[in-house]
Image (cartoon, rainbow, N blue to C red):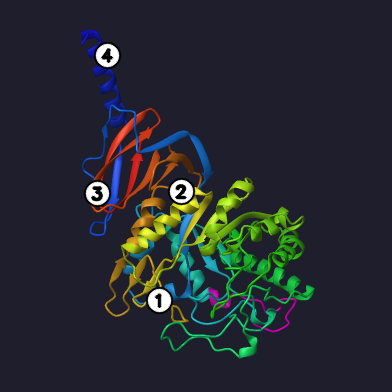
Amino acid sequence: MNTKLSITLTAILLMAISTVNAQKVEVIYTTPGERWVEAKKAAKVEKSAEADITVFTDEKLQVIDGIGGAFNELGWTALNAVSSEKSKEVFNALFSESGCNFSMCRIPLGASDYALSYYSSNDVPEDFEMRDFNIDRDKFILIPFIKEALKVRPDLLVWASPWSPPAWMKVNEHYAMRSGEFGNALDGNKMVEGAQIFNNATAFKMQQRYLKAYALYFSKFVQAYEKEGVPLCAIQPQNEVAFQPNWPSCTWRPEDMAYFIGEFLGPQFENDGLNAEIWLGTVNAGDPQYVRTILDHKTAQKYITGVGFQWGGARSIPTINKEYKNIKLMQTENKCGEHENDWTSVERSWKDMMHYIGNGAGSYMYWNMVLDETGKSAWGWPQNSMVVIDSQSKELTYTDEFYLFKHLSHFVQPGDHLLKSEGENQLAFQLADGRVMLMVYNPEETAKTVKVKVGDTTILIDLQPTSINSVVINK
């Protein structure tokens, strides 16, 4: 080989190595047996331009608004079973910069299936002027829960959605849509047969006085929370608009939801000068026409900032992302599992994470952050959580899904962007400080090496068997 050419090629390679070293590539991995381990051997340069994953650093996609989970009454109950030191450990694990670094969380407006019992902020029938509206119950349960998080993360964003309006505003005058038990639970909901609703017809009383009162109900809730030092960034008018379970719930036809938002809720927020945004959600309808009907409504559309999707809504979000470029999107609740709390939950949640974020979601929510060892709702369904607190032994367990979310939210914060990327089992982000964070999953039971092209540099990353990885590349 020509001596000058050899020297030139060697110089180029050394420059590439120097570039990668200067970038200080960091790899942190989690496997079923090891959690949050910093790899000793981070990366090396590959001469070839071929790549398994390509990150286009000059093509930013949606901005990230926040990542987090949900505050519920049973979570606070579980935390109260342990010492203040262990409780603080949990809050630091979820909200500190060294932990999951959660930036946005969800609360129920009234009872959810993980409340201790049925309730709303006004259970006085036909109190259309909301004279008896109050958040007194929340002052003793949800608000202390949130405030502990705010001590660790003062700029935490909080949004709210109801599972059901006050029962007297529903056509069956009951919090649930149907009766029934879950599995062998003996505490399932009981309801007179004629009061059950088994379809997606609107279960809200669509008379003007109820609609007006409900808009006032939302406004008072936002104002009451702000008075307690918990400003809400947004509300979504109904959890799971197309579902009839035996816990708090209320179905809405899209035409009726559009009418409520456009003629009552939006004007009420506007007249009261509220800063909280109105989002359509949470949408669990798989047909995108549900969302189209509301976003195309002449009066509703001007009040809606974003759309939140969960469960069946996963089928709708790709279409809505393509058709409505000026609307923000959110995944509002990851699939809750059956209390398995193992690696199968990671695999399911990772697929959903790629799907939602890859289709425009700028915010992503876990469901229950904390539960006791049973994981059971008040209606008997045992579900997953990020942290399990054993009420007897007082031991804390951080589940596999805790680490899955930490691999994302520890690094990715509001204002960061998803980056266009190509390749399997990965998501790439541009962080505000200029670094690139690649989240990549190795589903194989053997170790593998992936070639990652970032800009003009191709880097080889060694992945552990069955592992979720955060690869951070400095400029």
Magenta segment's dominant SS is: loop
Mark positioned earlier in the residue sequence (1 or 3):
1
CB-based contact (under 8 Å), mark 1 and mark 3:
no
| Residue assigned mark 2 | 413
What distance separates the C-alpha of mark 1 from that of mark 3?
A: 32 Å
Horizontal side of residue 7 vs 257, given as left or right: left
- Residue 365 image position (x, y, % from top left): 48, 60
Mark positioned earlier in the residue sequence (4 or 1):
4
Mark positioned earlier in the residue sequence (2 or 1):
1
| Residue assigned mark 1 | 382
CB-based contact (under 8 Å), mark 2 and mark 1:
no
For discs 4 and 2, the disc positioned in front in the rendered view: 4
Where disc 4 sits, the SS reads: helix
State the residue in front, 461 or 219. Answer: 461
| Residue assigned mark 4 | 8
Horizontal side of residue 144 vs 43, given as left or right: right
Horizontal side of residue 139 vs 186, given as left or right: right
Mark positioned earlier in the residue sequence (4 or 3):
4
**Amino acid of disc 3:** Gln
**How many other residues sit within 10 Å of disc 3, few (<14), some (14-19) or many (≥20)?**
many
CB-based contact (under 8 Å), mark 4 and mark 1:
no
- Residue 206 image position (x, y, % from top left): 75, 74
